[in-house]
Image: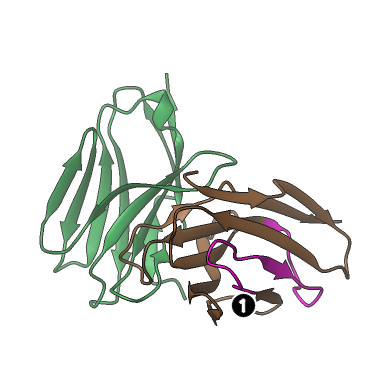
Amino acid sequence: DGGITQSPKYLFRKEGQNVTLSCEQNLNHDAMYWYRQDPGQGLRLIYYSQIVNDFQKGDIAEGYSVSREKKESFPLTVTSAQKNPTAFYLCASSKRRGGTDTQYFGPGTRLTVL
Amino acid sequence: QQQVKQSPQSLIVQKGGISIINCAYENTAFDYFPWYQQFPGKGPALLIAIRPDVSEKKEGRFTISFNKSAKQFSLHIMDSQPGDSATYFCAASMAYYKLSFGAGTTVTVRA
């Protein structure tokens, strides 16, 4: 899990609620990523950030929002607009932007909508 | 639209056997091909990676074979051990672009 922490490990949400997943890294990495993992679908990119105060949508950004106010932190908010939020969420970071730098993953947060 | 296609979805191998996972890609601009290993309930971790200027890379019992003309690459796990039981993801990317992951292969090694 390197120097990336995610909290909480498990999260339960009622329909219609927004929830925020925490991701912190102490690796001094510039780039951070959020992925969603569903069985049989691999990892799909939600949002990524290459520097502080800047972020871009990934492949499945609808219903999610992020912020990057500090280099170390990249929280993800799952909004009530996300139609099927139950999934395993993974945060990652890399030294520099771009896919050719090794991405280090956190331990993940499992979100369940009740 | 998945840019990297991975097969099989799952495989079972006896201890000491060889596990083979295959991936294919379409984008010829890809120039970095990593493999990630994920244990249940954990985040993936980089296992081994290759660039297209070599056809094979070996690290311990893990070998990547790369066929640029066929746009295919594969992971071979030699002398498979129960501790290798995990989900393996192939991926591909190019500089300053995001990683595209395959759907994953769950490997079970029977003792």
Left or right, A69 with respect to B55, comes to right
Left or right, B74 with respect to A56, comes to left
Q: Which residues are magenta?
A: A67-87
Q: Quadrant of the C terminus of chain B?
A: top left
Q: Is residue A42 visible?
A: no
Residue at point 62%, 77% (across, down): A61
Disc 1 secondary structure class: loop
Residue A78: image quadrant is bottom right
Q: Nearer the viewer, residue A69 or A10?
A: A69
Q: Is residue A108 above or below residue B70?
A: above
- Residue type at tag 1: Ala
Q: Which color is chain A depicted in?
A: brown
Q: Nearer the viewer, residue B100 or B25?
A: B100
Where is residue B46 shown, x and y percent of the image?
Answer: 37, 48
Q: Nearer the viewer, residue A41 or B14?
A: A41
Residue that carries the numbered disc 1 in the rendered image: A61
**Dominant SS type (magenta):** loop
Where is residue B95 shown, x and y percent of the image?
Answer: 28, 74
Q: Which color is chain B depicted in?
A: green
Q: Is residue B29 visible?
A: yes
Residue at point 82%, 69% (across, down): A18
Q: Is residue A79 magenta?
A: yes
Callout 1 crowding tier (Cα within 10 Å): few <14, some 14–19, many ≥20: some
Q: Nearer the viewer, residue B73 or B97?
A: B97
Where is residue A21 shown, x and y percent of the image?
Answer: 70, 60
Image mark 1: chain: A
Residue that protrudes farthest toward the left in the picture: B54
